[in-house]
Image (spheres, rainbow, N blue to C red):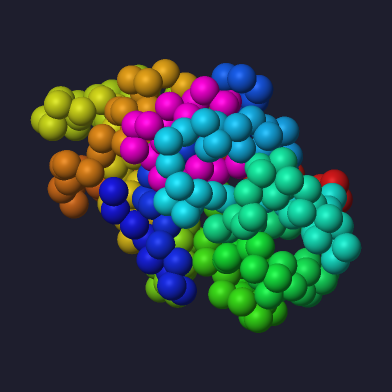
Amino acid sequence: MEYVETAGVRIPKIGLGTWQNTGTECTKTVEAAIDTGYRHIDTAQAYDNEQAVGDGIAQADIDRESIFLTTKVWRSNLRYEDVLESVHESLDNLRVDYVDLVLIHWPHPRIPLEETLEALSELHDEGVVKSIGVSNFTRSQLEDARRISELPIVANQVLYHPYTDQSELQQYCAANGLALTAYSPLARGDVLSEEILERIGRQYDKSAAQVALRWLIQQEGVVAIPKASSKSHLEQNLNVFDFSLTDAEMTQIDDCRGPLTVQLRNRLPSVVRHLPI
Ligand code: 1BO
């Protein structure tokens, strides 16, 4: 495993994304992922799967300290007291004494960041939150968070895959030593039949998915959290540290834009970001 190191925090470059994976299926996936070698698990209170994730961690043969565990506070819970309550509820759901990273899941246009960040800082002082970050923040929102926060903002988690352009945010994060975590790194399966990725993959005996993940983690500061449920996909997604893409291949993938439907779907986070709830 390789890591992104930021403000004294070591984040495994490949983690397990659990968005839209719930119940027993989620528990089995988390347990299988840990058995396969994953040491980074990503959940959120809004995913409605924290208990299932906690069960998976409990059932796996692993010490809690060996896992980098992230959860998120949903945007309707960003008032001071609500943050405290939400994180404590997450700890109960997950049945852990602390989480390694808590993210503000989406920015809220009407709740001051000062209030949310102060609550996160209190949770850090309490010892139940080891580090904090944000998700779905634009560069300017991220700059505000960094300016306001007493604690380092260690990561911004955003939609990022070969059909999105996050180059400006990636450069900003790299220049300032933050992790940029890519959710839906395989574009919900849309990149699996991308001809450019398949062609590059043939040179290395890798799948399109592995090339897409490699393209992400080969960029400075980038972490990817692909979702998978079968043992073979879990293994494949983790097996991306034994080859490197050339600069020319990285550029070819930078230039992929994908079908129009995917391009339109990629605009969703920026639309949702401005909704009050
Ligand atoms: C609405 C959830 C997006 C990924 O965390």
- Which residue is pictured at 58% across the width and 65% down the height? 130
Q: Can you see residue 56?
A: yes
| Percent position of residue 124, x then y | 66, 70
Q: Is residue 252 left or right of residue 193?
A: left
Magenta run includes residue 48: no
The boundaries of the magenta stretch are 26-43
Say above or below: 20 vs 78. Answer: above
- Which residue is pictured at 57% across the width and 26% down the height? 27
Magenta run includes residue 31: yes
Depth check, front residue: 109 or 85: 85
Depth check, front residue: 242 or 168: 242
Depth check, front residue: 263 or 212: 212
Depth check, front residue: 264 or 5: 5
Q: In which image quadrant can residue 148 be found? A: bottom right
Q: In which image quadrant can residue 140 be found? A: bottom right
Say above or below: 216 vs 184. Answer: below
* Number of numbered markers: 0
| Percent position of residue 128, x then y | 66, 62
| Percent position of residue 119, x then y | 78, 69
- Which residue is pictured at 14% across the width and 26% down the height? 205
Q: Is most of the magenta stretch helix, strand or loop?
A: helix
Q: Residue furthest left?
A: 203
- Which residue is pictured at 42% across the width and 32% down the height? 33
Q: In which image quadrant can residue 220 be found? A: bottom left
Q: Can you see residue 224?
A: no
| Percent position of residue 212, x then y | 33, 36
